[in-house]
Amino acid sequence: MSGGEAIRPERHGGHRSGPGHDDGSREQSMVPRAAFRSYYGRPVLKPPVWEWKIPAYLFTGGLSAGAALLAAGADLTARPQLRRAGRVGGFAALLVSMYLLVADLGRPERFHHMLRVAKPSSPMSVGTWILVAYSPGSALAATAEMLPAAVRASLPGRLLHLAARPAGLSAALFAPGVASYTAALLSQTAVPAWNDAHRELPFVFAGSAAASGAGLGMLLSPVAEAAPARRLGVVGAATEIVASRLIDRRPGFVTQAYTTGRPHRLRRASEYLTLGGAVTALTLARRSRVAAAAGGLALLAGSVLQRFGTFEAGVTSTKDPAYVVQPQRRRLRRRSEGLEER
């Protein structure tokens, strides 16, 4: 594999002092800068085999977590319609998320097999157990909201209604883990773009989850009850946009996977929609039901595009050998410079 840096002469052999030679002259390239290639034009890393189901799973899982957190706050502040929207919408998103995950695994029993062990060093194992801890509370709280009036008046219905609050609070307790564990899962892979952004991705995903949950609340609840959703939408959008911009400004070649091509277009559209939704939440959504619904849809759409853009950046970074080789050479150069200083 040829490198991406020109070969330069060493100080002791590339320049000579004496007539016709200037010791202070700049070093000149011996050969032109070479292009990165791999054997038979194949990538150094195998691109992820995941399909669209995985970025969709990332979005729906984050949406469920954001909605559960919002529903818990609505419950504690006596906003029944916002609470209902968060609980039912969050559980519906969780069901879709679980379906997408199991469908991508190919065989449903593979998810069951992951429950046989608990491995703290494995993001996949930790994430599986976070989902297991989160799901019962979300399911119970949503079931209490969907009970018919006749059943709700019965003794089992009253008991379920009493259990709904602790169940919703339990789901909210695990919601931050559900929103962010997928970022840790991606960043622990060998995919250069995901691994390089391991510090920022959890904030991107957590902010995106909060923004999408808030968007769902703004879309499905009346303006009079949606103040917490509007505030959460602004905070989530700001967190997502700032963390995403920090990825764009990271030094090094791998950043180009996010700032060029299809990933860049998806993430830029996501930023516009998320920012538009946040501005609407701060202004028109406080008075207009139509504006609140439009702002909520913008936040939801922005979250979707953020997940797909991040996913596409990872796939792009596995297809070009330069994304693998250049960071390795930079690390080796720094290591050698450190040894020379010693």
Image: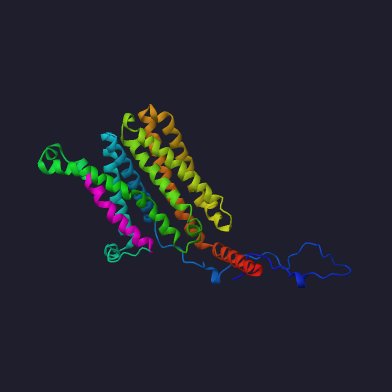
Residue 266, position as x, y percentages in the image: 48, 48
Residue situated furthest right in the rendering: 19
The way the protein has been coloured in the rendering is: rainbow
> How would you classify the magenta stretch by its main secondary structure?
helix
Corner quadrant of residue 255: bottom right
Which quadrant, please, contains the C terminus?
A: bottom right
Q: Nearer the viewer, residue 190 or 99?
A: 190
Q: Quadrant of residue 80?
A: top left
Q: In the figure, 114 relative to 262: above or below?
A: below
Q: Report the side of 335 relative to 153 (left or right).
A: right
User: Is residue 181 placed above or below 235 in the rendered structure?
Assistant: below
284 left or right of 82?
right
The extreme front residue here reads 342
Which region of the structure is painted magenta? Answer: 121-142
Q: Is residue 202 magenta?
A: no
Can see residue 92?
Answer: no
Residue 312 shows up from this direction = yes
Q: Judge from the rendering whether residue 256 lies leftward or rightward of residue 58; answer left or right.
A: right
Work out which residue is located at the far left of the displayed protein and give it: 154
Locate residue 56, reporting x and y percent. Answer: 37, 52
Q: Is residue 131 magenta?
A: yes
Front residue (pair 310, 153): 153
Spot the residue most to the top: 287
At 10% across and 40% down in the image, what residue appears? 154
Point out residue 234 in the picture as x, y percentages from the top left corner: 43, 38
In the rendered image, which quarter contains the N terminus?
bottom right
